[in-house]
Amino acid sequence: MTEQEIRTKLVEIFEEEAKLDRDELLQGQPLANLIDSLTLLEIVCQIEDTFELEIEDEQIPELKTFADVVEGITRLKGPDVQSN
């Protein structure tokens, strides 16, 4: 899986769970301005299922923007991620 594939899948998850479109996500706004905390938790659960990984509770506050989410998932997937 490449970082671009991760980004694409994450956009799909955010579109489905939070009804956000790609443009809103890529503007770099804080997620707190776009979604509520319950929606963020639903997104985290969906990400964990989709990417078959576990996001620790203390890592969630670090996911401030969509770019942070992409970076975090890429880091958690580690050597499985191929560079673009």
Image (cartoon, rainbow, N blue to C red):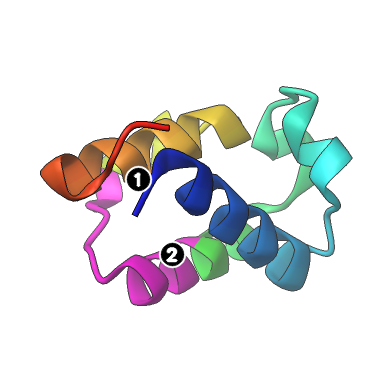
Image spot of residue 4 (x, y percent):
51, 42
Q: Is residue 53 magenta?
A: yes
Give the residue type at disc 1: Ile
Left or right: 17 as drawn, with respect to 1? right
Q: Is residue 79 above or below residue 46?
A: above
Q: Quadrant of the C terminus?
A: top left
User: x, y (%) of residue 30?
Assistant: 68, 27
Mark 1: few/some/many CA within 10 Å (<14, 14-19, 20+): many
Tag 1 secondary structure: helix
Q: Residue at the far top: name it.
A: 28
Tell me, yes or no, whether the two marked residues, 2 and 1, touch with CB atoms within 8 Å: yes
Please give the name of the residue rendered at 22% of the width and 62% of the height, measured from the top-left corner.
54
Return the residue at label 2: 47
Where is 23 relative to 52, above or below?
above
- Say whether disc 2 or disc 1 marks the residue closer to the N-terminus: 2
Q: Secondary structure at mark 2?
A: helix
Q: Is residue 31 magenta?
A: no
Residue 41, image x and y in percent? 50, 62
Q: Which residue is mark 1?
A: 73
Q: Nearer the viewer, residue 77 or 28?
A: 77
10 relative to 62 in the view: left or right: right
Task: Indicate the position of residue 47 as horizontal and vertical percent values.
Answer: 43, 64
Q: In the image, what residue occupies the spot 46% across and 51% down?
A: 6
Which residue is situated farthest in the left direction here? 79
Q: Which residues are magenta?
A: 44-58
Q: Main secondary structure of the magenta part?
A: helix
**Residue at screen point 28% across, 51% down:** 57
**Residue kind at label 2, given as amino acid type:** Ile
62 or 78, which is in the foreground? 78
Hey, which quadrant is residue 58 in on the image? top left
Q: Quadrant of residue 83?
A: top left
